Image (tube, rainbow, N blue to C red):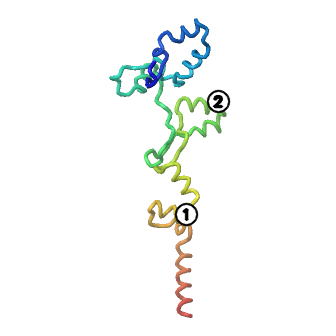
Amino acid sequence: MRPSAVLINESQLGTRLNHAIDHDRRGEFALLLALLSCDARDMAQFQLDDGALEPELALRKKFELPEAQALINDLTIQDSPIDNSSAFSHGGVRAFQLMQALKPEALVIRGDKSAQMQRVLTNCDLLTRQKFNHSAKSELYHALDTHFVDQLAQQRQMSRTLA
């Protein structure tokens, strides 16, 4: 075997594994096994023709597998993500496992921001988050009663005139 050749599956070894076993060369056998890819999709029986556009979709169709579980749900695209927590609260662990098998929910649910940016934004104050999100009105003013804000403005104006 050439040193530049990449060893992916066992069919590329030919009879070298058999010869290593027959001649009691455990070191060579262990080395050859260590060089093989540990991903099951790289095994010879799962290799598809080069003309296949989506090998993962072809394998899913061949073995009749469901769609892959979404790892991250983007709340800006999908308003109501799958939530199996009610199955857990009403039916326990087995009901949750059944719902997770039927309709798997995403492992992480977040918006359109990356995980690092979300981590940064959670450590920021409310005003900084709103500046980042380009929101025109502050949630702080929504929380306060409008009449109270007007009263504060009037009191500040009165204190300026008195001073």
Instruction: Estimate the x, y position of residue 72 in percent, counting from the top left.
Output: 50, 41
Tell me the residue at 48%/51% (across/down): 113
Furthest residue in direction top, as rendered = 22
- Pick the front one: 128 or 88: 128
Instruction: Tell me the SS state at disc 2.
Output: helix
Residues tagged 2 and 1 counted as in contact (Cβ below 8 A): no
Going by the numbered disc 2, the residue's amino acid type is: Arg
Q: Quadrant of residue 23?
A: top right
Tell me the residue at 58%/58% (across/down): 123
- Which dot marks residue 38? none
Instruction: Estimate the x, y position of residue 86 in percent, counting from the top left.
Output: 60, 39
Furthest residue in direction right, as rendered = 92
Tally of numbered tags: 2
**With respect to residue 150, does 14 lie above or below?**
above
Instruction: Estimate the x, y position of residue 136 in percent, counting from the top left.
Output: 44, 66
- Which dot marks residue 126? 1
Give neighbour class at mark 1: few <14, some 14-19, many 20+ (Cα, 10 Å). some
- Decide which of tag 2 and tag 1 comes sooner along the chain: 2
Q: Closer to us: mark 2 or mark 1?
A: 1
Q: Quadrant of the C terminus?
A: bottom right
For marks 2 and 1, give the CA distance: 40 Å
Furthest residue in direction left, as rendered = 51
Furthest residue in direction front, as rendered = 3
- Pick the front one: 40 or 67: 40
Going by the numbered disc 1, the residue's amino acid type is: Leu
Tell me the residue at 53%/37% (across/down): 105
Instruction: Estimate the x, y position of residue 30 in percent, counting from the top left.
Output: 59, 18
- Pick the front one: 77 or 37: 37
Identify residue for label 2: 94
Instruction: Tell me the SS state at disc 1.
Output: helix
Give neighbour class at mark 2: few <14, some 14-19, many 20+ (Cα, 10 Å). few
